[in-house]
Image: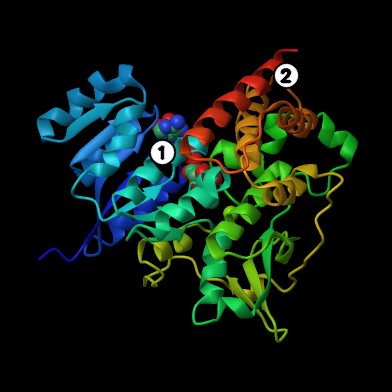
Amino acid sequence: MKEYKRIAVLGATGSIGRQTLDIISEHPERYRATVLTAGSRVEDLITAAKKFRPSLVIIGKEELLGRLKEELDPLGIECAAGSKALEECVDHPEIDMVLTATVGYSGLAPTVRAIKNGKDIALANKETLVVAGNYINSLLSESKSRLYPVDSEHSAIAQCLAGEDINSVSRLLITASGGPFRTWTAEAMAVAEAKDALKHPKWNMGAKITIDSSTLLNKAFEIIEAHHLFGIKAEKIKAVVHPQSIVHSMVEFDDGAVKAQLGVPDMHLPIAYALGESSRLKGAERKLSLKDYSTLTFEEPDIQRFPCLGLAYRALHEGGTTACTINAANEVAVSAFLRGEIRFGRIYPLISETLERTSFISNPEYSDYVAINEEARKKAEEILRN
Ligand code: NDP
Ligand code: MG
């Protein structure tokens, strides 16, 4: 009988995907990578496939399929390409768990399909819960699949909640590094460019989440994500700026006790905790040395300079498709910002103008999220052009 768990790594060439493959490679007795996917970095995907020998490998860009097959056909590895293949790959019979580490809205469809197929999920792609958290929860309630958060804050909260009664939670305190603009003036932030925003002080991550961290929209997304994961009301979830990024989040209970999870800022731990279904792996390379952190500080976030943070509460109070629209507008804004077409100060106005102009559906079904995502993108593109 097989002893190891078979993992589909969606987004295998990215920051989370590569760190997941590190863990799989260090623990062959526990894990195998049976499906690998990527968007366009075909050479990195080929290198990973040669090392991990998965059953199936998929590249998003169809024109790169020939290159993939050239290298992997001789090894007997099945190859496919395109968005349909990226979604359908979760049907593969040799998968026990799907790790979702693609960026943005693209994470939703394969996650929905995996839950419908009863596969467990290690969720890095937070946008899935931001866009369609209620829908995902209703699917989970009818499925045998279980969902484990990879995001470090949510992993920290899950670790603090182990053995506790969720009804005795009074607040979730989600820590934020504050990003590269924590000490900048509003005037300087308004004209900041991508090169400034990409200098994250603590975490080395993909470009999109690094920009989201600089606007604090990433923290807004994490508040929404926490609401859907743990069933805690918006007003009981707070962001706390903690520049050292050692406390990964905290849970406050009714009796005043506060539990925190601490560790070095390194995603290997939360990824491993999710792959292990909330169990711990031995052999961490980096352990926390408290003498290196004689001072831990905590500040209120500045909502005036970081208005994106407030979008979490608007999204959770309005419900429906508001968060889906925010996510779509942000994806358009972040792409334009990374291409140098807009300055930092345009990101929030672009999202709020898109919200004003996009339809709202209060009780969305899956097809409504698809439609609103498209509508909001079109509106955001129009606003950008004018
Ligand atoms: P990266 O940009 O580093 O990697 C993204 C991966 O997804 C790459 O393999 C990329 O392929 C692939 N990809 C991107 N877009 C698509 C698409 N449309 N279809 C198919 N594949 C696609 O991102 P990160 O690893 O930083 O982030 C992944 C997710 O995890 C995000 O949702 C992020 O918010 C979340 N997350 C990340 C953290 C981190 O530390 N990085 C921490 C917490 C959450 P290719 O490059 O080959 O084109
Ligand atoms: Mg996080």
Q: Residues within 10 Å of mark 2 (few under 14, many from 20)?
A: some
> Looking at the picture, which amino acid does disc 1 mark?
Ala
- Most distant residue in the bottom direction: 255
- Most distant residue in the top direction: 386
Q: Is residue 120 visible?
A: yes
Q: In the depicted view, which residue is nearer to us: 362 or 369? A: 362
Name the residue: 18% across, 42% down: 55
Query: Is 165 on the left-hand or right-hand side of 298?
Result: left
Counting every numbered tag in the picture gives: 2
On screen, residue 56 above or below 247:
above
Name the residue: 66% across, 29% down: 359
Sequence-earlier tag: 1 or 2: 1
Q: In the depicted view, which residue is nearer to us: 232 or 121? A: 232
- Most distant residue in the front direction: 363
On screen, residue 85 above or below 140:
above
On screen, residue 354 above or below 289:
above
As helix, strand or loop, the secondary structure at mark 1 comes to helix
As helix, strand or loop, the secondary structure at mark 2 comes to helix
The residue labelled by disc 2 is: 383
Residue 292 appears at what percent x and percent y? 65, 70
Label disc, if present, on residue 109 of the rendered structure: 1
Confirm or deny contact between disc 1 and disc 2 (CB under 8 A): no
Q: Is residue 265 visible?
A: no
Query: Is 116 on the left-hand or right-hand side of 73?
Result: right
> Looking at the picture, which amino acid does disc 2 mark?
Ile
**Disc 2 Cβ-to-ligand 1 distance below 8 Å:** no
**Disc 1/disc 2 C-alpha distance (Å):** 27 Å
Residue 282 appears at what percent x and percent y? 36, 72
Query: Is 234 on the left-hand or right-hand side of 19?
Result: right
Residue 136 appears at what percent x and percent y? 47, 50
